[in-house]
Structure formats: C-alpha cells, structure tokens
Amino acid sequence: MANPLVSIIVGSASDAEEIAPARHALKRFGIEHEAKVLSAHRTPGELVAYLQDAETRGVKLIIAGAGMSAHLGGVVAAHSRLPVLGVPFSSGHLDGMDALLSFSQMPGGVPVSTFGIGKAGAKNAAYQAARILSLFNPDIKERMNQVLDEDKAQILGRSLPEI
Amino acid sequence: MANPLVSIIVGSASDAEEIAPARHALKRFGIEHEAKVLSAHRTPGELVAYLQDAETRGVKLIIAGAGMSAHLGGVVAAHSRLPVLGVPFSSGHLDGMDALLSFSQMPGGVPVSTFGIGKAGAKNAAYQAARILSLFNPDIKERMNQVLDEDKAQILGRSLPEI
Amino acid sequence: MANPLVSIIVGSASDAEEIAPARHALKRFGIEHEAKVLSAHRTPGELVAYLQDAETRGVKLIIAGAGMSAHLGGVVAAHSRLPVLGVPFSSGHLDGMDALLSFSQMPGGVPVSTFGIGKAGAKNAAYQAARILSLFNPDIKERMNQVLDEDKAQILGRSLPEI
Amino acid sequence: MANPLVSIIVGSASDAEEIAPARHALKRFGIEHEAKVLSAHRTPGELVAYLQDAETRGVKLIIAGAGMSAHLGGVVAAHSRLPVLGVPFSSGHLDGMDALLSFSQMPGGVPVSTFGIGKAGAKNAAYQAARILSLFNPDIKERMNQVLDEDKAQILGRSLPEI
Amino acid sequence: MANPLVSIIVGSASDAEEIAPARHALKRFGIEHEAKVLSAHRTPGELVAYLQDAETRGVKLIIAGAGMSAHLGGVVAAHSRLPVLGVPFSSGHLDGMDALLSFSQMPGGVPVSTFGIGKAGAKNAAYQAARILSLFNPDIKERMNQVLDEDKAQILGRSLPEI
Amino acid sequence: MANPLVSIIVGSASDAEEIAPARHALKRFGIEHEAKVLSAHRTPGELVAYLQDAETRGVKLIIAGAGMSAHLGGVVAAHSRLPVLGVPFSSGHLDGMDALLSFSQMPGGVPVSTFGIGKAGAKNAAYQAARILSLFNPDIKERMNQVLDEDKAQILGRSLPEI
Amino acid sequence: MANPLVSIIVGSASDAEEIAPARHALKRFGIEHEAKVLSAHRTPGELVAYLQDAETRGVKLIIAGAGMSAHLGGVVAAHSRLPVLGVPFSSGHLDGMDALLSFSQMPGGVPVSTFGIGKAGAKNAAYQAARILSLFNPDIKERMNQVLDEDKAQILGRSLPEI
Amino acid sequence: MANPLVSIIVGSASDAEEIAPARHALKRFGIEHEAKVLSAHRTPGELVAYLQDAETRGVKLIIAGAGMSAHLGGVVAAHSRLPVLGVPFSSGHLDGMDALLSFSQMPGGVPVSTFGIGKAGAKNAAYQAARILSLFNPDIKERMNQVLDEDKAQILGRSLPEI
C-alpha cells in the first residue's frame, strides 16, 4: 500500500473483529491505512522499530487497540510523537473496564486519546481520525462531510414500530 | 485575542483550576487559545451559537472539560465537526468515574477523544492538541519537540532519596 | 395521534425492545403517547426542533431512553422545561452503568428523573408518568388505581413450588 | 404550615445539610413544603401513618433522601401513590453509590425518580418538583421560569480568569 | 406445615430457582421451613401482617431473598425482631452488586446478615440458620455436624485430572 | 471475664476504633464479650487454638472484623461451627469494598453473616448478636427490646431545622 | 511424581479448566508439578498438613487458584514461607473482581503475588514460576528462553486480514 | 552500591514515599537494592537500556511501582526475563484501582506479580522478594525467618483496650 495516512496497531490477531469498524470507517472516508499486529509486551523491539519508521513513511495518526492491561497506547505514545488514538477492547473478564482505564489514565505529558470500549470505540477512533485529517486535507474533509450527512439521513429515516 | 487555534470550554466557572494545566501547557507550546464557560445544560443555545462561529474564526480543536454527567463533550461533537478533546473532572461524589464514562462511551459516529480524570487529563489534552497541530504547523512542531525534550530532561535528573 | 400527553424519545431504533415496557404500560394506563427516534448526538437540530414544538402540542412529560454516554436526558432537559424521565439502557459493554450515571449525575438546576437500567426502568418511567398525570387528571388516576390493584392481586396469587 | 404541596422526608436528622439545597430551591420557587425525619427501618409504623395522611392533606409530591441501603424511597413508593423523588446521600464509605443503586434499581411497577448523589441531586429533586407542579399550577410555572432565567443569566456572566 | 422454625421470603416468584439451595440445605439439616412470595414494594401490607404473626407461630429466623434494590431484608428487619438473613440475587443488569449493597449497607441499629450473591449465598444462609439453631437445639446440632462432615468427605475425595 | 457469650476478633490492634460500636452495643444489651487481636495471616496457629477452646468456654457467637483482603471471617468459619458475624473495615485504599466482598462472597457451605462497612456494620453485628441470643435467653431479649424502644424514641424526637 | 518443584492448589475440583493453562505452561517449561484440591474453608486442617510437608519434599513455589472470597492464597501464605502465586477465578457473579481483590489486597507482611483473572492469569503464574526458578536452575532457564522465543515467533507471524 | 540483588523502579520521584516500605523491608531482610526513577512513558529508551544491563550486574528481581495507567510493570516484564513484582499506587482520582488492573490484567505470557495498592503492597513486594531469594540464598532465608518471627511476636503482644 502506497502512503497510508493512518496506522492501526492491535496487540493480538484475535482483536481483528473488534478493530474492523475502524478499518471499514476509514475506507468510507477514503483514508488509506495499514494494519499491524504488534504487542507492547511480546514484540516490544519490533513495535519500537515500526514506530520509528512510521512517521518518515508519511503516517500521520496511529490507532492502537488492545484489551486487558492495554499498555499498547502508552507505549506507542512514548515512542512516537504522532497523535495516538486508543481503543480499549473487552477481552478478559472485566468487560473492558481495565483497558479503558489503562488507555485513559495516562500520566501528564504522554497523551492517548481514548474512545469507548469495543466496536463503537473503534468506529469513533476512525471518525476522529477523519476530523483531524480534515484540518489540512480538503479531500478528506469533503468525503467526511458526505459520510456524516449520510449517517444523519439514515437515523432520520428510522422510527419505532407501532405497539 | 487574534486567531486562537484552540478553544477551551468548561461547563462551570468552578472548573477553572482543573482546566488550568491545559491552558498552561498550551502556553508552553506557543499555541493561542480562548477559554469559555458554556454549559450543555444551562446555556445550550449560547453553546451552539458559539460552536457555529468557531470554525469560521479559525479554531482547529476544541477542548471540553466537565464533571459528573459531563454531556459537554458529546454536545460539542454533535454541533461541530472539529476534533473534540474531552477532559473529565472529579466534581461530585464519584471521583470523576461518571464523567470519564460520559465522555468516552459515545455512540459510534460521534467521536470524543477522552483523557484521564482531572489535571493530568487536562494537561494531556493540550499535549495531544500540540501533536495534532504539529501535523501541519512546523512552528508548533518545533516548539513541541523542545517542550517534550525539556520534560524528559527533567525526569532524567530525578532520583529517590537515600533510605 | 391526537393529543399525546407523553412523548417517548430514544436515541436509536435498536432501543425499540428496551423501551417497549414503557409503551405497553402507558397503554394499560390509557395514556396516549408518541414515540420518536431522535439522537442528541446525530440529529441534534431535529431534536431541538421537536422539543420546541412538543409543549405547544400538549405533551406534558418526556420519557428519554438511551444507552452508553446517554446524553439524551440532559439535552432534552436543557431544551424543554417539561419534566424529563430518563431510562438508561445496557447497550455497550458496561451493563448500563455508564448510562445510569450519565442520566442521574446531572449538575444542579437541570433535573432528569432517572429509573433503573433496562426494561424494569422503562416500565417504571411509565408508572411514574401515571402518578404525575394523576395529580390533575382524574381519569388517569382512576385507571392507574385499577392497574396497581391488578398488579398487587397478581403477586398475591403467587407461591413457591414444593421442594 | 398550611397546605404544603411537597413533603420532604429524610431517614436521619444528620441528613439536614445534604437535603438543604432541595428546601432552599423550593423556597425560591415559592413552593411550600414540610420536612420530616422518618426512617423506613427505625420508625416504619410512623412513616406509614404519615404517608396515609399526606395525600389527604394536599401533598402532591414526596422527596425522599437517604444514604447507604436507602430503602426509604422504595418504602414510600410502596405506601403512597404520589410521585416519589429520591435523593441518594453519600453517607457511609461508598460515596453514595450504594444509595444511588438502592433508589434507582427498583423492580418494575414501583417507580422512584432518582437524582444524583448529594447536594446536586437534592437541588434537582426540587427543580423537578417545580417542573411537575408547573403542569397544572400557573403561579409556580411563572415563578419557575423566572428562576430558570436567573440561573441562566448567572452562568452567562461567568468567565475563566486570565492565565 | 406444623411449626416451621425458618421462614423464607422472596420478593418475586421468579426467584424460586435462586432460593432453592437454601431450601434444599434446610431439608438436609432436618429444619422445617415455610416459603412465601411477599414484596416489600408491591404487597407491603401483607408482608407486615405476615411478619407480625410469624414469631407467635414459632418462627425463629427469616431468610429474605431479593434482587436489584432489594429492600426486602431491611423492611423485614424493621417489622420483626427475629434475626434476618439476606440473600442478594443477580436479577437485573448489575450482577447482583446492587442487591448486595442494598442488603449489607444497613444503617446502624437494624441488622441484616448478608450472604453472597445468588445460589452460593442462598446455601450459606441455610447453613448459618443451622449454626444459629444449633445453639439451643441439640437435634439440629447433631444433624448439622453430620452434614458438615459429609461435605468435607466429599471435597477430600476430589482431585484434578491428569494433564 | 467469666463466661462471655460473644467473642470479638479483629485482625489488627489498629481496628480498635472501628470495632468499638459493636462492643458498646453489646454492653448496652448486657451481653458479656471478650475481644482479641488475632490474625488469620500473621498468627494463624494462635487463632485456631483460640477457636477450638472458645465453644467449650461457652462462647455462642463470634464477631470478626477485618479490612482489605479480610480472610478472617472465612478462616474463623472454617475452624469453628459457631455462627460467625463479619464486619468489613475500610482500611486500605478501596473504602472497604475489598473487605465487603471478601466477607460476603464465601463459597457454599461456609457461611459468614456480613454487615456493612465500618462502624455502622460493627454496630449491626452486635444488634444481630442480640437478636440471635434473644432466641433462647429471655433476659437478653428483654434488654434488647428496651434498647430498640429507646432507639426508636430517640429518632422520633428528631426534626429538621427551620430553613 | 518424584520431586515436583511447583505445587498447584485449587479450592474446588470445578476449577480444573481454569487452572489448566498453568499446568500446560509448566509442562512446556519442563517443570514438574503436583496438583491438589484443598480448600481453605472446607478442608483447612488437611491444607495446613499438606503445606507443612511441602517444603520438605522439595516444593519451591505454590500456585493457588480460587474464586469468590478466595482466601486460599492468604491462608497458604500464612502457613508456608514459600513464595505464593495467586490466580483469581471468575466463578460467582462478579466476574472475578472479588477474587482479584481478595488475593491482592493482603495486609503488609504476608505477600501473595497476584495475577490476572482466569486463564490468562493462570498461564502467567506458570510463566512467573519459570522466571523465578530460572534464577537458580540453568536447565529451566534454558527451556524458558526457548519457550519465550517460540511465543514471540508465533506472534510475529500473525497479521490482520484484508478488509 | 556493590551487587544489589533487587532493583526498585518507580515511574516518578513523587512515588518516593509510597515505595519506601519496600525499601525499609529489604533493609530489614539484609537485601541490597538499588532504586531508580525511570518512566515507561517519558524515558522509555533509558528504561530499556537500564533493564538490559541489570541482569548482567547481578540483579535477580525487579520491583516496579507506578500509579494510574501503570504500564511500568508490563514494559519491564517485556524487556527483561527476571521476575517482576508490581506495586500499584493510588495517585490520580481512582484510589489505585486503575493501577491495580493495569498491573494484574496482563496478557498471557508476560507475567507481573501484583501486590496490593500503596504502602501495604510495597511492603509485600519486598517480603515476596525475600521469599524468592530465600529459595537459593541461606543467609537471606535465615534473616527472613527472624523478621517473620519478630513480626509475629509483635502482633501477639497486642490487645484491644478496655471499653
């Protein structure tokens, strides 16, 4: 893939389904992305090597998804100065509350933008990526406005059944 | 103030101290901001009017801070297509857990980047603003890199006392 | 529908089943209602327009149901001075605890009556609507007393099996 | 006191300060109230006797405030068919989370309108009382609209300090 | 049933399966019990009438099981001076945490012995009843000792499979 | 002390103030008790030795108070067949929630009656001891009825201040 | 089995599947273990007898797995001076949060190393055992390094599907 | 310091007081340690460099203390194959629950032994270090046994005051 603007990293291949809404949404926005399985805990060296290269290759934003202790977002934000968007997954027994806190409660100076647990959060990370890239990319802005207008039209057409 | 790039909105004037770390950090990054007290619940019309005007005036990012039910982030993200960075405050009796969930658990399609509870989160929202604006503003990028290097130097100089 | 006294608003058409107990209970009480899908986040303008019209058309009470961040109750209470009854849904990964806090922990001055999570809460919102409307509508009061007496008779007839 | 429209019941005299915002707000709305210390657990007979008498004496709404297990709201709703507004207090070690759940998670058919924990919730119970009584009392409606307008003017006058 | 020593009360007939382990355990201990469906909220008068009669008829202990707000234990302890053993059920969306807090966090002076959530708690309430009745009933003590010895023999015979 | 009916055990001498309400209440009921500092973790042998002796010496009930992991209740219930009443303390950082769960969530077959966190729970353990001992000791029953009547008279005399 | 270095104890035979990942991992590391069902609550004497013997027989580490109140880890650490590694299980209604707190929140002086809830925690207890035994056993160290390298190779081979 | 067996790392110099009980306990056990301020987020390169050197210099165990997101334990365990003992601190607004989950809920294969929140956990990490080092160092074993005996003697001498 030539020139992806967004990099998506998940800690485990088993997170594929949870992160999919982010990837589908980026596609709708016409934003190229690359997706990697790299673990802060099990492949730390490879993760750091990947991050050092990413900015040079033109990546603008990193979406990091992980469950449980979910150190991925913090480790990515420690090794890259690009904006990091974190998506907590509900793997494990605590419904993703552990991952939500692990992403959001970062010490001052190392920011990770945290979104909701699971698929809704994954989708929102992509929507936020579109908002950020729209600040300086008019094509993405135009496509984003189309998508947001379609979303709104869709909900306006809905109603509750007779009862 | 001519041309602020960042708008900071808090739901109550009593949040001044909690949001201050965001404002101080923006100053360190050399990023102009304007700060407003506008409530999603008590001044909804004024909030919407302010948001419609903000993008035209050159605002690129909105930092929204609120405690308790903390609907401010969601309402801002509903009425503006700029990136919204949310800071949950610990006002009320639940240590900010209510606000953390209210900011982060947004439905798919309306993103709010959520940071940690209180002052650490406020600081991180500003640091994330710097990362985002650095994507297309080289002056901010240079200043951000200086600040991050200073931060690192400061922690490297620290040690634990003899015991 | 001519002259509904109660308006039910949910944030998503997928909430239809969760809000149904409120609608069935209103029917038992002989209270007309209208039901709308309107989102505080995705159709904010339409929601506000609907609310401005509602009181004039004779609506007395608004029941708002939503899950996750659940800003709907607060936004409705910000744009209408009618009593708002909020029902948190358990959509998302946190069993509705996020929505329960988002409905109940409102800042002082903008009240939302919050009920329990899910169907029991939906039913109770309708029962509370009946109690409120009974204060000045003797027909509803009479019908409410019949329903409450039937409920009580039903539970009195129940027993545990031999063991 | 002749003819109070609202009855306030707290489970303990030590709750006086927590419930005070409800009483002050009712005063601002020009709504007469009576305030009682009656416990669902320690004076159950007196509580039931009081409730049976209340409706006859003209009481329209009951605000019940309690901490910890907080059965007061449910017991009041079981013995009266008036609308019950519940305010959870943060007495005990769990910051009021116990009381919030005890008020809100009522079984279907016995509604208690629950507000936020502590003083903000107490204030909101009174504001909701004003909204409800305004449905059929034009004097209260007029006074409520004045109060809500004053509240809004007050917040519009506020700003954050220079930094 | 002549002369039950233990009364079991649940708030809803749908709790039959959850309370069953208490009833089976009482049977193993040779302790007669009666089981009633009576609700603190929906049949408060009948509950109080039942309680006033129970002590006279020879009941020594009351086991109360309920879910969600779970005011049953507190109401029983308010209207009877017999020991009350409470079993929180996991009905509703919060896994029984609401009921656990509602049973245990009683104000000083009105005790409810709380056991674990669901079937393990129900079983333990019966085992505690056996321990209490054994204090003054040698037949129950003898039978309890047999049951406890059987329980221990059963676990000692267990092992983990080869792996 | 000759012939105490109740044994109070706490895991640490620093729990003295938290358990005091149990001891004061037992005194009001005229129930003799002995109080020991014995830890399930730090003095397990001494604890077991004490428990084996207690029943022979006439102890009828054991009140166990502990914070944090709070294994004391379970260990006492494992080594004695007397009724065990557990009081969770709020030592540590989690407000006693850890101790509440550790006391209450016992596996089936080993019951610990759990009361609320801290002083209210300590008081209630003593009140429950009085209810249990009243089942077969008329002197304690008479004294308990006096105390309960005094408690009720005290709350009936209370009112909220003018406002 | 001659000379197991690790002893695994679970409180119930029904925990067999949850603890299995610890046993499989130990096998991969070439570390002999023995596995016992012994309960802190139901077979306390047998547990203590087993522990007194274990160190003499050459056991170096004890892995204790239990759910709910989960006193097993603390009781083992009280009766043995070997390192104790605790694995909380999610049996019961609270997803293992009760067991996690019961294992970790030990009073100062009686350490239990706590791992995550369920199978991931069980696996990690075994991996930690390998790290500890590697400190003085070169064979285990060599085998551990092989296993860790295999684990890493496995994750590096994974990727997300095209989308 | 020549040849420390234990390395203590905290993420911030402000953690000095929280980690002190670990350092004092190690001193009592006669175990040399070195203490460093190194952050997984703010000085990741320096942390990794330190870890690569530590094992060579003779360090056997690493105690990592951190608050909030608390990724330190996981990052240390990712870059070192020594046993890692984690101590969650209560910095931030969530009483250390965020840090407790971030330390303990590690993915399978990367173990961090987690202890309780704050000073009790810090003390226990040192006590566990003594248990581990005693497995192959008889001097430490002898000194540990002395300390544990002193601890026990101290608690046996304690009693509750007369009342």
Image (cartoon, coloured by chain):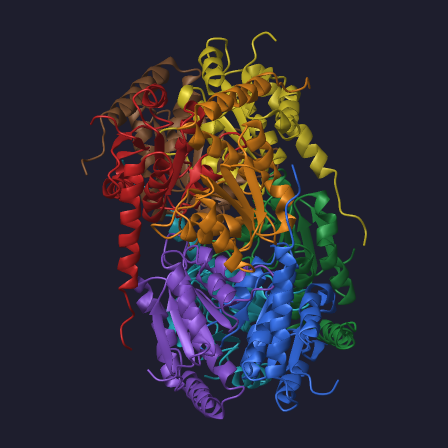
Chain colours: A brown, B yellow, C red, D orange, E purple, F blue, G cyan, H green
Query: If the image is split into quadrants, where does the C terminus of chain D sit?
Result: top right
Image: B116 above or below A151:
below
Taking F24 as reference, is A46 left or right?
A: left
Residue H47 visible in image: yes
- Counting from the top left corner in percent of width and height, residue A88 is at 44, 42
Q: Nearer the viewer, residue A17 or E106?
A: E106
- The single residue placed furthest to the right in the displayed view is B162
Q: Residue at x 23, y 34 (%)?
A: A160
Q: Residue at x 62, y 47 (%)?
A: D15
Query: If the image is split into quadrants, where does the N terminus of chain D sit?
Result: top right
The quadrant where residue F33 appears: bottom right
The quadrant where residue C151 appears: bottom left
- Counting from the top left corner in percent of width and height, residue G53 is at 57, 85
Q: Nearer the viewer, residue E84 or C30?
A: C30
Taking H35 as reference, is G91 left or right?
A: left
Q: Residue at x 34, y 24 (%)?
A: A31
- Counting from the top left corner in percent of width and height, residue B38 is at 54, 21
